Image (cartoon, coloured by chain):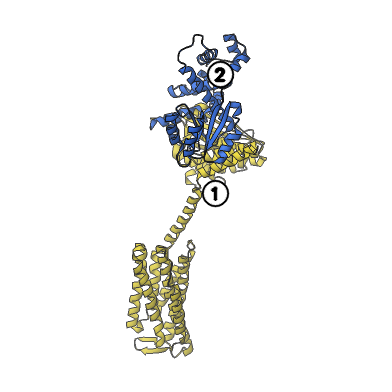
Amino acid sequence: MLRMEIALFLVLAFIAYIYFSAGKKHTLLHRTFSALLIVVLIHLALDGVTVYTVHHLEAVPRFLNDAVHRLFLGSMVLVIYLFYQYIAILVEEETGRQRRLDWNARIFLAVAELGNFLLPISYTVTPEGNYSSGPYMLVPYGAVAFYLLLCAGLLTVNWRQIDQKKKLAIGAALLIEVTVCAMQWLNHTWLISGMGITLMTMSFYLTLENPDILRAELTEQKMSMLYLKSQVNPHFLYNTLDTIRIQAQLNGDKKVADLLMRLVDFFRLSVKVDRQMVALDDEMELLEAYMELMCYRYPELTCEYDIDPELGGVQVPNFILQPIVENSLLHGLKNKGYRGEVRISARRAAEDRMEILVRDTGSGFAEGKKAEIDRMLQNYAKQAARLEGSSIGILNVQKRIKLLCGREYGLSYTENPTGGVTARLLLPLREEEMA
Amino acid sequence: MKKLRVLLVDDEIMIREGFKRLFDWEAHDCQVVGEAADGMEALAQIDTLRPDIVIMDINIPIMNGLKVIQLSRMKHPDTAFVIVSGYDDFSYCREALRLQITDYILKPVNYEEFGTCIDNLKISLFEQRVSSAAEPEEQERTITGITRYLQAHLAEEVSLSVLAEEFHLNPQYISQLFKNEIGVGFLAYLTNIRMEKAKKLLLSTSLSIAEVAEQAGYGDYRVFTKVFKKAEGVTPSQYRRDFLEGSADV
């Protein structure tokens, strides 16, 4: 018989390992399941020990046999209590109604544990095998009956409000435990309570607590945080900034008012993220607002534009210039104390394409950096989508141009003979279709 | 010229204060006669104060600005409305254009540039007066002659001294004439009619930006683009595109 206990223990230990190493939300439900897993493991270990000791009544001292048996059934009562807790929390989460039976469950737990350690214990020896018996056996059966009835009650009262899958998990777990207990009741020598508990744990693990579901929950939580973050009403943002700007101007601070005005412009333009393609004019307007703010912060920074006005209506991927210029500032001009110039020019390069050059007088590429950037831009498709890092901006620009305009277009870098680098964006000359 | 009476409508006190105190109404021959913070108040104020110009926010409580304009239009057809809005959404623009408002400006309002808007308003009032003058007078008034000459010679280099020679008048006198008759300076007037011409060309022809610039009197299209952007808030090509886009799905 001992083989089954060892197998069950190993299976649950494996499940516990997977469960604890999975990232999950920190909720009461998951904490309860964690506690449950630990207690179940202890219980299964004690199960194995008692199966051994009860069959070696002569070799094992009586008091030791009593102790492990009492501990074994004590842990079983605790497991059943935790099952009840888990289901109660689950039901509470589903229905939104407060749990009300917690104290009853805890008082019963205390009484049951007390009974478990005080009531007399005896051992029955049969040809099929030995088992512990006596009044103390009232405790586990009583506990199972009490808690399972509570669970069944919770399930029926809230039947309509509980999700189908959760109903199934709870129902299956209860059914398994009832069946196993009944079988144990009828065949004292089978000693299968550990199996019931393992199966019950498994039914929850497989349906509600497996790593895929935990990960999905966690992702959903992160996404909803991001979503909330992006939900700051842009009208609120720039209306408030505008109010502050007017107050500044009323106070006579023209400079602050002007800067706030540009910041408002920048926000107003950058919230138009829902569009994939925009006119070059729109893109330039955003860039000018950005550069004006940067040039104010760094007075020795200057910016020159040379844009062929006939190209103003050309459709380009949204938000491609600002990351390139930001890159020039952070990786080129910053190293020169923001002293220098950024020159942005756009011209027709052939019948059907244009080129935009962003030329800076910064520090240029560090040793080996040029090759690295070239490689990254060449193999843009193989680069994992990164969420941070210094090259994320230009890699994104490259990916979007290739995706939205075609593979023959894109971003490349060259070094200027006089120092600094030039970013070259090759783009198709497509005006929006005007039906 | 009598002072133009202005009513300010915006639910935010700071926006009204900004208009009241940061724009030089005096210099533009205007006078703020009242304020309103919601649609109903605006309607009542328009009835009692009879303003010449209403500066109107769209998103205001109780009744929105467009509705207020619609209702007031019937009773006071001569009132000019300038819509000031944070909604840079062309659907609002189109609705506003249907209501024949005089101008549409976007928040954040640049008070220096707001002057152009008032100047444009005065010029259109002047043109209304000229066109509605019952019969051509015996002796055409000097200012009408000058403006007609300007319309015809837009593409050329025109200046006060050119006009002085053409009309045998003192340049200072002509300058004063503009101030008195129209309420705006000569240059503001010239820029305005050049922009009107450019807008007409942008929408009704497929001339390139450089050609439009040339016909509107700007030798350098870069200068033209800059002036246009300052006056209209968008570049010439954007202007053309916005209009075509808008009319495409009307």
Q: Which residue is mark 1?
A: A388
Q: Is residue A370 visible?
A: no
Identify the residue position indicated by label 2 in the image: B181
Q: Position of residue B89 (x, y in %)?
A: 46, 36
Tell me the SS state at disc 2: helix
Q: Residue at x 65, y 42 (%)?
A: A335
Colour of chain B, in one word, is: blue
Chain for disc number 1: A
Q: Amino acid at mark 1?
A: Glu
Pick the residue in front: B45 or A393.
B45
User: Does B155 appear above or below A384?
Assistant: above
Discs 2/1, front: 2
Above or below — where is B52 with respect to A185? above
- Cα separation, mark 2 vs mark 1, equals 63 Å
Kind of residue sitting beneath label 2: Glu
Which chain comes out yellow in the rendered image? A
